[in-house]
Image (cartoon, helix red, strand yellow):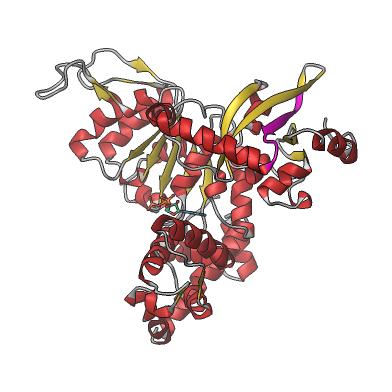
Amino acid sequence: MITGHFLNNQLLDIVFESTYYGTVIVDSDEKIQYMSKNYCEFLGLERELVIGHHVTNIIENTRMHLVVQTGKTEIADLQFLHGNYLITNRMPIIENNKIIGAIGIILFRDLADWKSLNSHINEILTKHNFFKQEWEFPKGVRYTLNDLIGKSPKIQELKDRVIKVAVGDISVLIRGESGTGKEVIAHSLHQLSGRSEKPFVKVNCGSIPEHLIESELFGYEEGAFTGAKKGGKPGKFQLADGGTIFLDEIGDMPLHMQVKLLRVLQEKEYEPVGSMYPKKVNVRVIAATNRPLEKMIEQKRFREDLFYRINAIQLFIPALRDRMEDLPLLVDHFLKRSASKIGKRVTSIHPEVLLLMQQYEWPGNIRELENVIDAGVYLTANKEIQIEDLPEYLKNHSFETEERSLKDIVEKTERKVIEDALKRFNFDKNKAAAALGIGNSTIYEKIKKYQIFGQSK
Ligand SMILES: Nc1ncnc2c1ncn2[C@@H]1O[C@H](COP(=O)(O)OP(=O)(O)OP(=O)(O)O)[C@@H](O)[C@H]1O
């Protein structure tokens, strides 16, 4: 095992600082045990804040964790890091035939050197953009865990769980309101898994017309129906073979398709439309929904057997209103992104805007915040977004809050207290009821009334 004791930082500093390489060493838990000073400087991070953290939380687009998992050396890989392309070598550290960690080396000499190297690589990449797209897009991954902004305990906990469950083939059900980042989590799970080199295929179960779902998912054979393409068409399951299929908005899938979906998940085979023979497939399933599936099962709108099949592990993403401490960080992130996208120098928001944002409920969650900031950056004539740059509904929000009825306020508070207690007791309803001093039947009633869902126990 690699330990801090084994790694004499001073000695390593002497060795690595005399080279022009940025060096990082991770242990078998994929946590950083050493990062050279020049690497920390390059990332703009203090070394104390880096050591002991999972490498994916610190280095964007890293593959160090995969080297630990697979034991495969990766030489001269191109890595996009901190706005630049760098050449990276990654090697497993092996002791007594066991992988005990990995060492990663990024190549740069001094800043000027690295800038010219970067522009050289950029030029090559632009010239070969076509190949770059061919190479990247079939895999389908757009986000990594680094794109999930937030330092609140709830997000920190979620990120830790994502890292834990990513490895392995277990099905994951991601739950959370619209715009909370379910898709970001799905991409991250794939990117952190052993299937990351294989395709990630998203299916939006809610937006495919009902009569096309079967051929979209399972494909069709030549001549399956009038208008069928010559040679047939592969379905999403075939496209995802070896990789991950992301079934977004699974709660919107029609019942008759739920039966077919269950079959492919259980038996790992399906029949393309018009085919006489089943085809084998090997995919990991990640599903997401913002619908109350338990309630839909009661109403016979969602199959219970399918629910248990996709619900091996559940990840719950908190609504923005439940992690308001992340708001300033998110605002800052979207401001920077918007300003550079739009090409305006807008660097902050007025303190009153932040106050108003903190009081707002954010029903559209992060997606809504992203759009509000985009609009603010477009509209403002200053370096700072002002109240008048906000959409009308948000500007008027403070008045609406004052006019809310007592019943609304009581209900909202009740919902929040019950939800917090459930999360505290890992969704054990009886324990949460006892802690709140209410009966078991009352808590069941309230959960139903407010449609609170999460890891059910
Ligand atoms: N924690 C976060 N940090 C930064 N950006 C985020 C975060 N969460 C979500 N986003 C951004 O918010 C937008 C919405 O996220 P996403 O599409 O993953 O939400 P969703 O839960 O899948 O929504 P829906 O249920 O409506 O499909 C995306 O642009 C995503 O990049």
Q: Residue at x 54, y 66 (%)?
A: 327
Q: Residue at x 16, y 17 (%)?
A: 230
- What residue range appears in magenta? 99-110
Residue 417 versus residue 282 in the image, above or below: below
Q: Provide the major secondary structure of the magenta segment.
A: strand
How many marks are shown on the rendered structure?
A: 0
Residue 240 placement, left or right of 4: left
Q: Residue at x 26, y 31 (%)?
A: 216
* Location of residue 455 in the rendering, given as x and y in whole percent from the top left corner: 53, 50
Residue 400, quarter of the rendered image = bottom left
Residue 189 appears in the picture as rendered? yes
320 or 374, which lies in front?
A: 374
Q: Position of residue 103 (x, y in %)?
A: 73, 30
Choose between 287 and 137: the one closer to the eye.
137
Which corner quadrant holds the N terminus? top right
Task: Please tell me whether residue 105 belongs to the stretch shown in magenta.
Answer: yes
Near-viewer residue (447 or 454): 454
At which x and y percent is residue 9?
A: 86, 40
Determine the image quadrant of residue 382.
Answer: bottom left
Q: Is residue 10 left or right of residue 268?
A: right
Inspect the magenta stretch and tell me whether residue 290 lies in it. no
147 vs 237: above or below: below
Location of residue 391 in the rendering, given as x and y in whole percent from the top left corner: 34, 73
